[in-house]
Image (tube, rainbow, N blue to C red):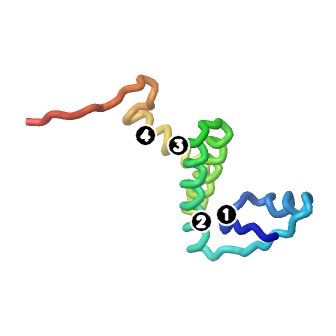
Amino acid sequence: MIKEYKKLVRDEIPEIIRRTGGKPLMKELTPAEYVDALHAKIYEEVSEYLDGYNIEELGDIIEVVYAIAENKGVSTEELDRIRLSKKDERGAYDKKQFLVSVERD
């Protein structure tokens, strides 16, 4: 029986599959395919988090975000600097504020 996945997986997944008796068919992605696969993966991980609010899924989301940043030439340290800079400029989400509307003259 063959089950198709057609998705980006973590580096150790093929070996884990082999150890459990499976035979993975793998493909090395081109740079363009890799970008597309990363974008599909972030949607997958966010959807999985929203399905059950499992905290482990947040770790998966962060791992994909780091991979996207690295693919764009941005280190995890630089990404965190960007995050902190934005936090300094616009704040975080600590106050739990929900914007309902804005009236302008």
Bin the neighbour count of mark 1 within 10 Å (Cα to Cα): few under 14, some 14-19, many 20 and up: some
Report helix, strand or loop for mark 2.
helix
Q: CA distance from mark 3 to mark 2?
A: 26 Å
In front here: 103 or 66? 103
Residue 26 x, y percent position in the rendering: 76, 72
Please tell me whether mark 1 or mark 4 is closer to you in this view: 1
Q: Is residue 57 left or right of residue 90?
A: right
**Can you identify the residue that label 4 sits on?**
86
Residue at x 85%, y 57% (from the top left corner): 16
**Can you identify the residue that label 2 sits on?**
37
Q: Is residue 84 above or below residue 65?
A: above
Q: Is residue 103 above or below residue 60?
A: above
Please tell me whether mark 4 or mark 2 is closer to you in this view: 2
Q: Of marks 2 and 1, which one's residue comes earlier in the chain?
A: 1
Report helix, strand or loop for mark 4.
helix
Q: Of marks 4 and 2, which one's residue comes earlier in the chain?
A: 2
Residue at x 59%, y 61% (from the top left corner): 38
In front here: 52 or 41? 52
**Mark 1 near mark 3, Cβ–Cβ under 8 Å?**
no
Q: Of marks 1 and 4, which one's residue comes earlier in the chain?
A: 1
Residue at x 64%, y 37% (from the top left corner): 54
Q: CA distance from mark 4 to mark 2?
A: 27 Å
User: What is the three-letter code of the residue carrying label 3?
Assistant: Arg
Report helix, strand or loop for mark 1.
loop
User: What is the three-letter code of the residue carrying label 1?
Assistant: Leu
User: What is the three-letter code of the residue carrying label 2?
Assistant: Ala
**Mark 1 near mark 4, Cβ–Cβ under 8 Å?**
no
Please tell me whether mark 3 or mark 2 is closer to you in this view: 2
**Can you identify the residue that label 3 sits on?**
81
User: What is the three-letter code of the residue carrying label 4?
Assistant: Lys
